[in-house]
Image (cartoon, rainbow, N blue to C red):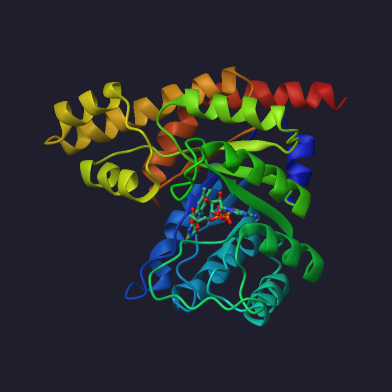
Amino acid sequence: MKIKDIFERERLVYSFEVFPPKPDYPIESIYKTIEELSKLDPDYISVTYGAAGSSANNRTAEIASLIKNKHGVESLAHLTCIDSSKEEVRQILKDLTDRNVNNILALRGDIVEGMEIVDGVNFSNSQEIIRFAKENSNMGVAAACYPEGHIESEDKSFDIEVLKLKEEAGADYFISQLFLDNSYFYDLLDKAEQKGVTLPIQAGIMPVINKRQIERIVGLCGATVPKKFIKIINKYEHNKEALRDAGIAYALEQIVDLISSGVRGIHLYTMNSPYIAKKITSSIDSILTSVREEDLKRLG
Ligand code: FAD
């Protein structure tokens, strides 16, 4: 099934993200995590993708296939293409199709120093990949968006134009970069609507449970860390359990506010932790049930 069909059926799409184990860990080390996440009944689970050429990428396809074919949960394979040739991407799309994986998150990926990008051979932005996937496969295609702007963008309003370009290229829906202040996401929704973007936008939420994680995130994607959040980190940085609980409570507050505001989806960056996903999912269980009941009434 294509995830866009889930968006047509459901007012709120609730999904998880996992990453493959590092190459020196056995792939089996994620099996239990997948099993436990699947039991929480998400609409789909996405699997991240490493830099092209890394052996970890076969694992993306393998894990996405396991989610779909063993656990019966729809899966979404991330695919970054900046340093892959069109032929390589064609092969990856075929491999995913052969494995019964029907959805990709089409990403340009990060530009790393020394990468050789050849015009006409490689892809230079996400729209090219989205178009290529639509023309060369039967995949459902998601795309990324950035509530605080993409880290390379000097003009943040240009990122909104890029959303429109991704929609025109054939994307089905968007998943957002993580954010810790919901006002950035609401601002993105308003600006996207003004630009004529009509696709659903899922909010990416990451429960931050340790100090190193937050430092890494800010370095990688430039997310703003609100004062309220810094207070939590400072207060509990030496108490692992307290910080984890505070991080989960913070993410829950974000999620409840987002759902109450009528967002089309929550994409939970689980950090491969069934504990976090369970805590969050069980805390919003009655909220998810009430949204599902409304869906059933609406669909008659
Ligand atoms: P693009 O949409 O191509 O945008 C990249 C930059 O180019 C932006 O600054 C944009 O404004 C600019 N741009 C785009 N189109 C044009 C145009 N037509 N003309 C001029 N400028 C343009 N990375 C991984 O390596 N693996 C993952 O699994 C992964 N998963 C992710 C999941 C989500 C939900 C998100 C939000 C990001 C993820 N990333 C992942 C990170 C992503 O690869 C980087 O943010 C990357 O730098 C941009 O990818 P993109 O597809 O958004 O690029």
In percent of width and height, residue 169 lies at 76, 54
Question: Outermost residue, front direction?
Answer: 155
Residue 41 image-quadrant placement: top right
Image vertical order of residue 193 relative to residue 58, above or below: above
Which image quarter has ligand 1?
Answer: bottom right
In percent of width and height, residue 103 lies at 68, 58
In percent of width and height, residue 285 lies at 54, 27
Residue in the picture at 66% in, 32% down: 192
Quarter of the figure with the N terminus: bottom right
Quarter of the figure with the C terminus: top right
Residue in the picture at 11% in, 36% down: 238
Residue in the picture at 55% in, 71% down: 62
In this view, the residue in front, 165 or 145, is 165
Image vertical order of residue 189 relative to residue 176, above or below: above
Residue 79 image-quadrant placement: bottom right
In percent of width and height, residue 71 lies at 60, 57
Question: Outermost residue, left direction?
Answer: 238
- Drawn side of residue 135 relative to residue 103, left or right: right
Residue 165 appears in the figure: yes
In this view, the residue in front, 106 or 113, is 113
Residue in the picture at 70% in, 27% down: 194
Residue 170 appears in the figure: no
- Drawn side of residue 183 relative to residue 66, left or right: left
In this view, the residue in front, 40 or 124, is 124
- Drawn side of residue 258 relative to residue 26, left or right: right
- Give the total of numbered labels: 0
- Drawn side of residue 246 relative to residue 128, left or right: left
